[in-house]
Image (spheres, rainbow, N blue to C red):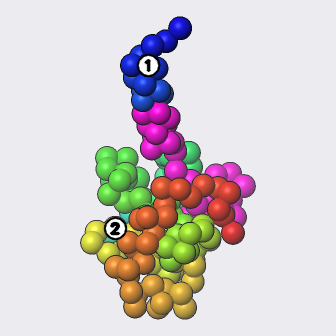
Amino acid sequence: MLDRRKFIAFSAAALAGAGKAQVDAPRPVNTLGSTDGVAIRGYDPVAYFRDGGPRLGKPEFSVRHGGAVWRFASAEHKALFEAAPERYLPAYGGFCAYGTSRGYLVKIEPEAWSIVDGRLYLNYDIGLRKTWLGRTKTYIARAEGNWPRLTTKDVR
């Protein structure tokens, strides 16, 4: 039989382990519309930074990362991503940043994008991007609060 101190210590350790499992759980990546697990509709996340906008990636320049296949327009972009994926990954797994701020995950249009403080944000469409740009900092703060709890059950 456990005494009270051992029980409390055991319970605290179990709870700490459970919390860590949630923090370390893989986050969803936007592969909507893809039957083969390709992220963000096959667009090159590096191109937004290096080329100033969206470019469709090519299957021959692909890499698996975070449970999805990421495509790149060139071998150079693929190498840049492999060297520092966190620098190029879109916020919120590539789901619509505005939708994430509202508490759900939705598709994106690659042409509806922005880079804020060095981070790529994608949006549902060009019209919603205009809304997003009107209060970006507010929406980012809300999305940051919602993102940790969102799962594939929250995809709309």
Relative to 1, say whether 100 is above or below.
below
- Pick whichever, 31 or 103, lies toward us: 103
Query: Helix or strand or loop: what does disc 2 sit on?
Result: strand
Would residue 84 be seen by someone viewing this image from the given angle?
yes
What residue is rendered at 38% in x and 80% in y? Answer: 138
What residue is shown at x 47% (from left), y 91% (from top)? 130
Secondary structure beneath label 1: helix
Q: Is any atom of residue 39 visible in this view?
A: no
| Magenta stretch encompasses residue 11 | no
Q: Which residue is mark 2?
A: 119
Q: Quadrant of the C terminus?
A: bottom right
Mark found first going from the N terminus, 1 or 2: 1
The percent position of residue 49, horizontal first and vertical second, equals 33, 69
Indicate the amino acid at tag 1: Arg
Percent position of residue 91, x then y = 43, 64
Q: Contact (CB < 8 A) between labels 1 and 2?
A: no
Q: Which residues are magenta?
A: 15-41
CA neighbours of label 2 inside 10 A, class few (<14), some (14 to 19), many (20+): some
Query: Which residue corresponds to mark 1?
Result: 4
Q: Residue furthest right?
A: 35
Q: Residue at x 52, y 50 (%)?
A: 27
Q: Quadrant of residue 48?
A: bottom left
Q: Real-space Cα distance between discs 1 and 2?
A: 48 Å
Q: Nearer the viewer, residue 66 or 50?
A: 66
Front of the two marks 1 and 2: 1
